[in-house]
Image (cartoon, rainbow, N blue to C red):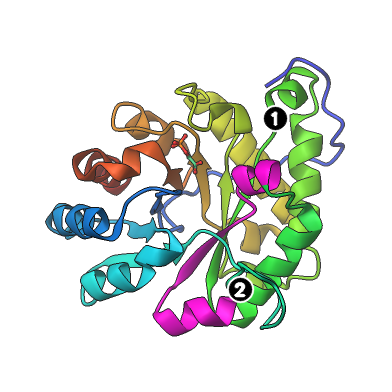
Amino acid sequence: MSSAPSVMLFERIDFMKKDIRRAVIAGNWKMNKTRPEAETLITDLKPLAENAGCEVVICVPFTNLETAVRLTAGTNIKVGAQNCHFAKSGAYTGEISADMLKEVGVEYVVLGHSERRQYFGETDETVNKRTKAALEAGLKPIVCVGELLWERESGITEEVISRQIKLDFAGISADELMNCIIAYEPVWAIGTGKTATADQAEEVCAFIRNVLAGLYGTDVAEKITIQYGGSMNAGNAAELLSKTNVDGGLIGGASLKAPDFATIINAATNG
Ligand code: PGA
């Protein structure tokens, strides 16, 4: 983290317990895999993931959701989507509602991914509305937050993250928060091969837990799963996942290869 002085004035809590939270390893396939390719990847992954000691989720493109739900039925692999709209239905060409996802058998939905924020104009306000809609439909949102490189270099990582958490979860109750996962994804680490160091990941994940403690109380904060995402791979996952406040991963590129994704799952199982 930057050497600039912190602007957050609250007393930091050192959250030491890790095993009260379930590790969740989620693959974010992004805009990859045709239907036959998805079938092959899921078929390859199933035996590799069957003894996982963590929750395993694959967040696939909309066109692969039905395939993924069908092929993972009766297994320990859960299916997620990569976005949903906040309206129940209506004139929103190209969008998909939370109810539509639920109907297909989806359990999770990634919201506020930096690629959505960067390329599709999503804001904390729309992420907040989407999160509420997802919760109302009975989905489990994986809400992504993270700073840009120049924000980190300007020493405002904590301000950025704290603002995102406060706005993205505005009006969301503690009970609802328990159904959410937070993914800390420094934007400079996504798809760049530049992973945050395990210490950097731990520092911000611990900070997020502190922000949650301020909003919801310590008991709630210590139960929320916080993932790290950004160039997590088979080689660096074990170290990242061994950190006290890193409860799992949101994995892009490395989730597209079954053996690599399985290695990360095993790292979470052992972590
Ligand atoms: P990456 O993507 O693992 O390819 O960096 C992570 C993400 O964007 O969720």
Q: Quadrant of the C terminus?
A: top left
Q: Which mark is residue 86?
A: none
Residue 254 found in image quarter: top left
Q: Which residue is nearer to you in this view: 104 or 233? A: 104
* Residue that badge 2 annotates: 134
Q: Element type at marker 1?
A: loop
Check disc 1 and give the amino acid type: Leu
Q: Is residue 21 above or below residue 268?
A: below
Regarding mark 2 in the picture, which secondary structure is present there?
Answer: helix
Quadrant in the picture for residue 256: top left
Where is residue 252 shown, x and y percent of the image? Answer: 42, 41
Residues tagged 2 and 1 counted as in contact (Cβ below 8 A):
no
- Marks 2/1: CA distance? 26 Å
Q: Nearer the viewer, residue 32 or 48?
A: 32
Is residue 109 located in the magenta-colored stretch of the structure?
A: yes
Identify the residue shown where x is 67% and y is 75%: 133
Q: Amino acid at mark 2?
A: Ala
- What's the residue at 24%, 44% (across, down)? 266
Residue 3, image x and y in percent? 75, 15
| 110 to the left or right of 48 | right
Q: Is residue 181 magenta?
A: no
Q: Which mark is residue 148?
A: 1
Residue 47 x %, y %: 12, 57
**Side of 255 where 108 appears, left or right:** right
User: Which residue ends up furthest to the left in the rendered image?
Assistant: 47
Magenta part of the protein: which range? 97-119
Vertical relation: 138 (above or below) 247? below
Residue displayed at 74% across by 18% down: 153
Q: Residues within 10 Å of mark 1 (few under 14, many from 20)?
A: some
Mark 2 or mark 1, earlier in chain: 2
So how many labels did they put on this image? Answer: 2
